[in-house]
Amino acid sequence: MPITTCIFDAYGTLFDVGAAARNAAAEPGRDAFAADWSRIADHWRLKQLQYTWLRAVTGDHTDFWQVTQDGLDWALDASGHDGDPELRERLLQLYWELEAYPEVPKMLQALKHKGMNTAILSNGSPPMLDGAVQSAGIGEVLDDVLSVESVGIFKPAGVVYDLVGQRFGCANDEVLFVSSNGWDAAAAAGYGFTTAWVNRAGDPVDRLPARPAHILGDLTGIPGLAGGDA
């Protein structure tokens, strides 16, 4: 069946998760942090994801804002910046104002022009996602923002991907699911979606039971993959 519905992961896919640390590092008086910001941002993101997986396995669910704080605390501790509460608060504030990647608005507009359903499906909590969508100014080109909080478990649990069909009434093979996380794209492919992995870093494909149908360097090619009537 043709694609009718384009679903996007949020963090790292539409929104640049490195922007909070990068922007903080550029502020006056943060020379020590500026020397470490890239490594801290990488550790922050990795721990944030690891904590979602571990909580999903153990059934000890909390919202994404808590794991975001926990991941940052680990990263600051590991880098010796845990004694700077003002820096911690500034990084968390900036996380609510993440920048969208430059191609995102035009890409979403092109999908809407083709008549596609468009939505986010994210681990993020609803307030976090609302803040990011409003900050990026993309609310008018999204039909919905779906959060795992409605089912109480993080991706890649299958009940999360169920939310797409429940919301849009579409079959799995009508969905193009887009994520910058290789594991997410693989899990969604195993679920039955057509998937596109946005591999900005040029990483190897994850060795998982399913693989994404498409691998892209950024989001500009998504409207072409989705097809539909221009």
Image (cartoon, grey):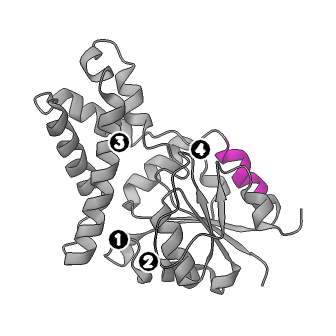
Q: Callout 3, which amino acid?
A: Asp
Residue 40, compared with residue 190, is above or below; it is above
Badge 1: how crowded within 10 Å, few (<14), some, or many (20+)?
many
At a point 36% along the width and 61% down the height, the residue shown is: 125
Mark 4 residue crowding within 10 angstroms, few (<14) / some (14–19) / many (20+): few
Dot 2 lies on which element? helix
Q: Quadrant of residue 96?
A: top left
- Which of the marked residues, 4 or 2, is nearer the chain's N terminus? 4
Which residue ends up furthest to the right in the rendered image? 230
Residue at the image point whose x is 30% and y is 54% from the top: 48
Majority secondary structure in the magenta region: helix
Secondary structure at numbered mark 1: loop
> Is 127 or 203 nearer to us in this picture?
203
Residue 204 in the image: above or below residue 146: above
Q: Which residue is mark 3?
A: 42
Q: Amino acid at mark 4?
A: Gly
Closer to us: mark 1 or mark 3?
A: 3
Mark 2 and mark 1 residues within 8 Å of each other at the beta carbon: yes
**Residue at disc 4, secondary structure:** loop
Q: CA distance from mark 3 to mark 2?
A: 25 Å
Residue bearing the label numbered 2: 160
- Which portion, as a residue range, is magenta? 103-110
Which mark is drawn over residue 137? 4
Which of 211/90 is in front? 211
Horizontal side, residue 199 vs residue 209: left or right: right
Earlier along the polypeptide chain: callout 1 or callout 4? 4
Picture quadrant where residue 153 is located = bottom left
| Kind of residue at badge 2 | Val
Residue with the mark numbered 1? 154
For the N terminus, the image quarter is: bottom right
